[in-house]
Every structure is written in C-alpha cells, then in structure tokens.
Image: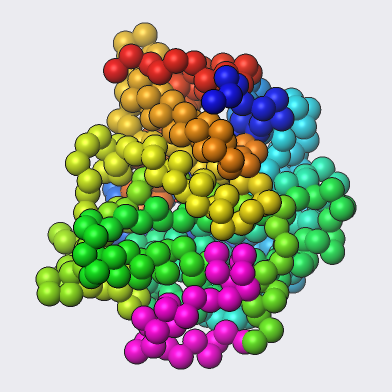
Amino acid sequence: MPASFPPAFLWGTATAAYQIEGAVREGGRTPSIWDTFSHTPGKVEGGDTGDTAVDHFHRRAQDVAMMADLGVNAYRFSVSWPRVQPTGRGPAVQRGLDFYRQLVDDLLEHDIRPVLTLYHWDLPQELESAGGWPARDTAYRFADYARIVADALGDRVDMWTTLNEPWCSAFLGYGSGVHAPGRTDPVAALRAAHHLNLAHGLGAQALRSALPARAQLSISLNPSVVRARSQSPSDLDARRRIDALANRVFDGPLLKGAYPRDLFEDTAHLTDWSFVHGEDLAVIKHPLDSLGLNYYAPAVVSDATDNRPDGRSERKDGHGASDHSPWPGADAVAFHQPPGERTEMGWSVDPSGLYDLLRHYAREAPGLPLMITENGAAYDDKPNADGSVHDPDRVRYLHGHLSAVQRAMADGADVRGYFLWSLMDNFEWAYGYGKRFGAVYVDYETQVRTPKSSAHWYGELARTGVLPPPPEA
Ligand code: FCB
C-alpha cells in the first residue's frame, strides 16, 4: 500500500450553484426548477429555499481565500444555467458569466484548479414549462448552453463536467417527485434519463468543438453499490433490476453505446423506448477523459413481490419519503438499512462500498481515469462555547473512505482526485438547511464561516498527501 497519494492528486471540495449562491433574482437570473419547487409549500423541509443560501454570490472572494487557507488544490463548482442563459434559450447574460469568470480567476490566483460542472439540477423553469427533461428538445438546449459556457470560460477552465448525477434529475425529479420539478410519472422519468444521456453526448460534442485540446471532459454519476440481502434467486434478481435502473441505464450508453436489454424488458409494460433514436447511442458514447463518481453509502435490496413496499414507511432507499417509487418497473423491491453506524441522513457508513465501486469501474472502463467527485457525510455539528466546531465523526468518515480509496488504488484503480462534499454547510435540497455536510460550519443567521476540525484535518492531508493513522474512536 502506498504511504502517500501521488503528488498530482487533486484534493478538492465540491459545491453546487443553487445550494450556495443565493442572489436568485440578481443580474438577470430567472427561476430554475429548484426555485419553483422550494417555493411550493410542503416540498422542502421547514419551507427552506435557496433564495439566500450561504450568500456565496456576494462572498465569492472570501470563500476562495478560505479554500486557499485550508490548503486544497481543486474546487468543483457548478454554473447556474438560469444565471447565464435565463430562459434556457438564446443569448447569454454577460453579468452571469462575469461571476464565474471572477470565481475562476480567484481560484487560479490561489493555485486552485477549477472543475466546472455545467448542470447540477437547476434547469431554467421555462424549459421545464416547455416539457423539461422528458422532452427531447431539452437535450439540444443543453448543448447550446454548454457552448455558451465553453466560449466564455474555455480559456481558463480545463476540467469540464457535463451533468451531476443524472439519476437524481431523472428519477427523483420525475419519478418519486422528491426533487424538482416534483413530477411523479415513471415514463417521464425514463424519458428524462435518456434525454439526460443525450444531453451529455451533445454537450460533450459542443464542448469538444469549442474548447482547446487540453480540456478534459467528464460526467459525474452516482452509481448505487447495490447488494442483495440474500443469495436467493429472487433477491439477486431484485439487485439486478435496481442495478439496471441506477447504474446501467447510464453507464451502458456512456461506456458501451447500448442500453441494457434487461432494462427494456423490465419496463416493457411502461414504454417501448421509442424515444431512443438510433443515432443517439453513438452521440452518447462520446469519449471521456475521466469518469466522476459520487459515493455516500451502499444499498441493500430484496425482492418484495409478495410484500410490496407501499408508500412512505416502507420505502427506505435513502432518497426521501414519497408515495411514488423512483424505480420504474421495480416497485416490488425493498430497501434495507444494514446494521451499524449511520450519518445524520440515515445513510450507513460503509467505506467498502467505495472500494467496490472504484474496483468495479476500473474493470468496466479500463484505461479511463476515475475521480471521486463527491464523498462526505452530514452530522449535526454544533459550535462549542468558544465558537470552534469539532466534528470527529466526519473525520472518521473521511479517514475510512480515503483508506478505501488508497486500497483501491493499490489494487489497480486509476484514481486521480477526491472532492469532499461539501466545502461548507448549505441548502441540502429537499432537506433544506437541516443537514450539514460542510467541512466549514456556516451560521445561517450571520453567514459567518468557521472551519470545523475536519476542514483542518483535510487541509493537512491535501498539503502533505499522507493519510494519517486512523483517529481514535
Ligand atoms: C448528492 C448531490 C449533492 C449533495 C449530496 C449530499 O446527491 O449531488 O448536491 O446534495 O448528494
């Protein structure tokens, strides 16, 4: 096992525009689906919205200086589509692009590598009103938007990610409805998945044609590490069904240029998939320079054909309560909480899942560098009387997962970087501000930022590249 990570390893933190920026009505920005959704009563815990979030739009320079103080060498952020192209069509708004130009310049000045994500879930509301991701046209709109951002920032950003977690956009947004836009239609969810894949391919083509040759293209997936509760044929089949809907629906077309046959069979009663046009698959299989993987916890499933999970209390897949399943054609699968430690999200702490994930993609996509674009944990952090914030659980979580990364690398996985979710506490989607994932604590009343002990721990690791011994339990 290597004593230290390679010198070129990227040590970053990650955020997303709607979760941190605020300033939702400034500079010509129009509502995204998340503005509409968060302002719809009952959709987000506590009625929280991203209106102010952590005010990063106004605190950009200070936040970048804070990252530099911590010692990280990379930053993964997303561009807000409605901030740079408010209606999702037509010309760009320069004021919106200027914000990201300044952000990138600040990062470069501090030797922090910008890693730009084009789409982290904030579709311009106008495009949703015109049909959203279930409509094919949205994929073409995304390619135009990709081109706009590439033309504006291609001279200074060389790591580009098309989409963040298309699974969540498609299946939580249009299937279970716990994410924006909150639709609950299984066929719309499947159509959305395909059009997100197509958007990735068209977007990658647009980026390639607009960017300098050195630019690197990627996508961030959140594959499920799915484990069967038993080795019975029916539980193994439940695992297969969820694997198709969580993983192979994306990595099949992306890496192999084909959708899995069993997915078509499992969903044949819902759709004939005629929304997939013959030429789409070659577009989607556009060459990538790395694959981004987001990992939090594994899933344990069993067959529930004779005992259908029905509604809120039964469906414990960790993606929020809904009467509608995010798994079209696999409603009769039960999700189980493995025993053991959990985070504040109720997600189990299991670094072996990250090891398995990295080894899996090292086999599935030989020669393709891997990047962990999100990993982290929510805990109920509270400041001490002296204002300091001590988060030993998060340090242990990070240590365990980074040890797993190191093991996977020793066993052959080509991992190039790790991005801690998240730089600072922020708007955690349907959970609002109640769940804190930050390495930096944010007081939401005053917007004062306080690095937690995990931030200091992580910064030291980023500076030295040496994983220290495990912290005391
Ligand atoms: C991921 C999202 C990210 C954050 C983490 C906790 O699914 O990409 O924005 O909310 O979960």
Quadrant location, the N terminus: top right
Residue 243 in view here? yes
| Above or below, comparing residue 422 to residue 286 in the picture | above
Residue nearest the observer in this picture, 458 or 141: 458
Q: Residue at x 71, y 67 (%)?
A: 286
Q: Residue at x 78, y 66 (%)?
A: 206
The percent position of residue 41, horizontal first and vertical second, equals: 31, 60
Quadrant location, the C terminus: top left
The quadrant in which residue 349 appears is top left
The percent position of residue 332, horizontal first and vertical second, equals: 23, 72
Start and end of the magenta stretch?
Answer: 251-277
Q: Is residue 58 magenta?
A: no
Residue nearest the observer in this picture, 23 or 88: 88
The residue sitting at the top extreme is: 386
Residue 325 in view here? no
The percent position of residue 333, horizontal first and vertical second, equals: 24, 68
The percent position of residue 357, horizontal first and vertical second, equals: 47, 48
